[in-house]
């Protein structure tokens, strides 16, 4: 398989990912407990879905863990910190619904704005580091 990008471009990609990662830690005021793929899965799943989601679906969104018990622990931690909220499901009394708390949704909105800015800056500088497949 022929390679498409050079090492400088790959390093620029890693620098971009590092900036995004630092932005993710900033969402949690520097608390690195949430610097985890499990929380990324959970919070982005809830952010994508503007309506509250069934707790079992939110647990399934945490793809890095296979145990429902482990997924439940991540959810319990987020609930305990007030990052997500839980309420009864009016359609099914046997299940609960989860959503991002209003402050968490606002923090994630700001995070994604910053991330898109970083992506745009990185993309515009990529061609200066060498040839790109599209010649731009």
Image (cartoon, helix red, strand yellow):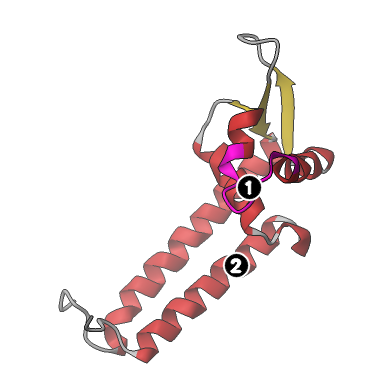
- The answer to whether residue 105 of the structure is visible from this angle is yes
- The quarter of the picture where residue 8 lies is bottom left
Picture coordinates of residue 38 (x, y %)?
64, 52
Picture coordinates of residue 51 (x, y %)?
55, 26
Instruction: Classify 103 as above or below 129.
Output: above
Residue pictured at 41% horizontal, 66% vertical: 119
Identify the disc placed on residue 12: none
Compare residues 3 and 107 and report the one nearer the observer.
Answer: 3
Query: In the image, 29: left or right of 43?
Result: right
Residue pictured at 66% horizontal, 51% vertical: 39
Q: Which residue is mark 1?
A: 66
Q: Which residue is mark 2?
A: 21
Q: Which comes sooner in the sequence, label 2 or label 1?
A: 2
- SS assignment at label 2: helix
Residue pictured at 25% horizontal, 81% vertical: 4
Q: Was residue 86 drawn as part of the magenta stretch in this picture?
A: no
Q: Was residue 67 drawn as part of the magenta stretch in this picture?
A: yes
């Amino acid at each position: 398989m022929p390679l498409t990008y050079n090492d400088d471009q790959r390093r620029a990609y890693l620098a971009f990912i590092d900036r995004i990662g630092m932005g993710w830690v900033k969402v949690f005021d520097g608390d690195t407990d949430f610097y985890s793929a499990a929380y990324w899965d959970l919070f982005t799943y809830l952010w994508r879905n503007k309506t509250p989601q069934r707790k079992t679906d939110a647990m399934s969104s945490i793809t890095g863990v296979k145990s429902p018990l482990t997924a439940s622990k991540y959810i319990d931690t987020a609930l305990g910190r007030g990052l997500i909220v839980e309420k009864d499901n009016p359609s099914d009394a046997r299940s609960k619904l989860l959503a991002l708390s209003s402050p968490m949704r606002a923090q994630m909105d700001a995070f994604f704005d910053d991330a898109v800015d970083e992506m745009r800056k990185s993309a515009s500088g990529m061609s200066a580091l060498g040839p790109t497949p599209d010649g731009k």
